[in-house]
Image (cartoon, rainbow, N blue to C red):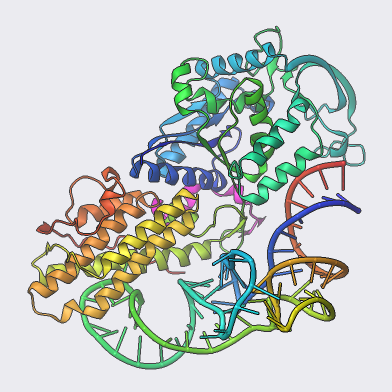
RNA sequence: GGCGACGUAGCUCAGUUGGUUAGAGCACUCGGCUCAUAAUCGAGUUGUCGUCGGUUCGAUUCCGACCGUCGCCA
């Protein structure tokens, strides 16, 4: 039954260049969005950039441009990266847009009106070089942990969000919904943090002006994080189109990395509660990619970091779909995963070149030789029909559980079984006739179904397979579960061999 | 220091409420096939299930201690 699916990535801070950590999160969200479109859900996929704050203002000054110019330039880099990777976001939000300022001011004004934002005095250790406060525990031998310089004690009048009032409500929320924060290990981590008690948090600054102005207090801007989180509400109409907002909220899936769990599982839900709204339905937390292997991690200049690697660098070697496929199929969602060029080559050659790509090649060749290049219809009673039904069911269940690697395993079982089916029937030994046509029809039908099921992961390749086996339109226009039922390859279509879709990569 | 997680084949991991021969993929070996991108298909090897002890008729699965790795908090 069709539903509604709102999925978000974090908005990425424009001071960073897009790297494969960003791409990992974004590709997962994209694949989920594509899957939900396939099953007919009303889907909204949001990504974007976070553009306020001290660091952007500083680097703009260093570059001799305005903060807005700095933000424009780097937001463009993210947009280009996502275009390169075939990301199908419905919207790209930027926190400097007027619609976002309106939403931030509306939500925080609401919280202020409700009495949970109050003026207070902040006092603490302050590093002049960082232009930032630290907690006592963050200091190293009483010094700034970044600059290793003495800190000053500073007092400032700021507006505080009364986070401490939400401790029990947050615990109740998480305990009442086991699926709200996944995986369960991260959920427990948040509960443990909450049970230690919460302090109020300072959410405004007077020391800079590159931010969203506080509507009730001249000279104050909101601290960048409390502005940024609200983007998830802005994009679906908060503060500008309440009816639209109500259709999408709170049924959201926030895809995040584990480093920002506290903002998404504590501060953000509390802000929503304080504004009289529901907390997010799902916060899905993935681990980090740990860079290993020789090829990428060791350079003449020393140890490389994951965040040094641009997606385009890997797309050069593996193609867009090779890139996407690796992060979806090789990394289980949740725990940290090892990432290496060598593992990427192995996964690409095994799954894409040897299994999927080679299946298409051998099928096309036999159809050309034995069927005059015209793809025949499948056997309604093929043994592959049951395999395909299982593959669909397992694939769908895994996408629903946010387990792309499990989903792709299930899809790939149909590819392997189709290779085995060809092997056991040996159509290349037969004379042209009904028997060859039946077997090749089965293989084409399996490819048709695989192409639909795999399209969220490797969309461009699936589009090309779809075209080469003679089908009109696009696998993305298909609707599951109906399109996954056995027997719909019509027969009588011209099948094109073409060049290898995934040329093997030599290690 | 407090809390918690994890430690299963060469590698990456699955193992539901304890039960009889511990699984998958990749890699590897052998064999088949030759339509296919030296691809594919079949068969097969490897595990004291971190260590020690306890509960039990019986524990990878429960309990305790220890070793190791890691996370969050202080």
Q: From what the image shows, is residue A52 above or below residue A384?
A: above
Q: Give the x, y percent position of residue B48.
A: 69, 83
Q: Is residue A203 above or below residue A335?
A: above
Res A265 → quadrant: top right
**Residue A473: quadrant of the picture:** top left
In the rendering, at what x and y percent does residue A188 appear? 70, 47
- Quarter of the rendering containing residue A44: top left
Task: Say above or below: A302 vs A36.
Answer: below
Q: Residue at x 43, y 46 (%)?
A: A31
Q: Tell me: A356 left or right of A128.
A: left
For residue A435, side relative to residue A196 (left or right):
left
- In the rendered view, does A272 fall on the left or right side of A329? right
Q: How many marks?
A: 0
Q: Which residues are drawn in magenta?
A: A298-321
Name the residue at 47% across, 46% down.
Answer: A27
Foreground of the two, A289 or A488: A488
State the residue in front, A359 or A439.
A439
Residue A64 visible in the shown view: yes
Which of the image's four quarters has the N terminus of chain A? top left
Residue A131 appears anywhere in the view: no
Residue B46 image offset from top left, x and y in percent:
59, 86
């Amino acid at each position: 039954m069709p539903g509604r699916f709102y999925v978000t990535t974090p908005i990425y801070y424009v001071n960073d260049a897009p790297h494969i950590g960003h791409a990992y999160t974004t590709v997962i969200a994209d694949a989920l969005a594509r899957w939900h479109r396939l099953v007919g859900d009303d889907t909204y996929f949001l990504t974007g950039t976070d553009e306020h704050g001290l660091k952007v203002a500083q680097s703009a000054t260093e570059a001799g441009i305005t903060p807005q110019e700095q933000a424009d330039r780097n937001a463009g880099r993210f947009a280009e990266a996502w275009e390169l990777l075939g990301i199908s976001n419905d919207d790209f939000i930027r926190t400097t847009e007027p619609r976002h300022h309106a939403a931030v001011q509306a939500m925080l004004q609401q919280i202020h009106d409700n009495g949970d934002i109050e003026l207070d005095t902040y006092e603490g250790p302050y590093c002049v070089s960082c232009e930032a406060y630290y907690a006592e525990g963050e200091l190293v031998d009483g010094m700034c942990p970044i600059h290793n310089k003495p800190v000053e004690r500073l007092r400032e009048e700021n507006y505080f969000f009364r986070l401490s009032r939400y401790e029990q409500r947050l615990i109740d929320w998480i305990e009442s919904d086991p699926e709200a924060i996944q995986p369960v290990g991260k959920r427990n981590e948040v509960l443990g943090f909450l049970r230690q008690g919460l302090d109020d948090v300072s959410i405004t600054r007077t020391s800079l002006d590159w931010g969203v102005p506080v509507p009730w207090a001249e000279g104050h801007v909101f601290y960048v994080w409390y502005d940024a989180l609200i983007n998830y509400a802005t994009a679906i109409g908060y503060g500008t189109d309440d009816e639209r907002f109500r259709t999408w909220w709170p049924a959201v899936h926030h895809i995040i990395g584990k480093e920002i769990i506290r903002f998404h599982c504590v501060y953000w839900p509390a802000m929503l509660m304080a504004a009289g709204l529901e907390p997010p339905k799902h916060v899905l937390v993935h681990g980090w990619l740990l860079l290993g292997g020789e090829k990428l991690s060791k350079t003449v200049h020393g140890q490389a970091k994951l965040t040094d690697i641009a997606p385009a660098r890997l797309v050069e070697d593996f193609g867009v779909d090779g890139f996407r496929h690796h992060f979806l199929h090789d990394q289980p969602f949740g725990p940290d995963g090892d990432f290496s060029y060598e593992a990427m080559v192995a996964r690409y050659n095994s799954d894409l070149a040897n299994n999927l790509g080679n299946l298409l090649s051998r099928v096309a060749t036999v159809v050309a030789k034995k069927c005059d290049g015209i793809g025949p219809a499948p056997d309604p009673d093929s043994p592959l029909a049951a395999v395909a039904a299982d593959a669909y069911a397992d694939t769908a269940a895994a996408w629903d559980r946010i387990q792309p690697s499990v989903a792709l395993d299930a899809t790939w079982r149909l590819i392997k079984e189709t290779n085995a089916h060809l092997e056991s029937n040996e159509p290349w030994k037969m004379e042209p006739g009904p028997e060859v046509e039946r077997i090749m029809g089965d293989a084409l039908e399996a490819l048709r179904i695989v192409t639909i099921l795999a399209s969220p992961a490797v969309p461009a390749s699936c589009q090309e397979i779809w075209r080469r086996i003679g089908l009109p339109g696009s696998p993305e226009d298909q609707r599951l579960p109906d399109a996954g039922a056995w027997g719909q390859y019509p027969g009588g279509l011209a099948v094109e061999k073409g060049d290898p879709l995934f040329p093997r990569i030599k290690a």
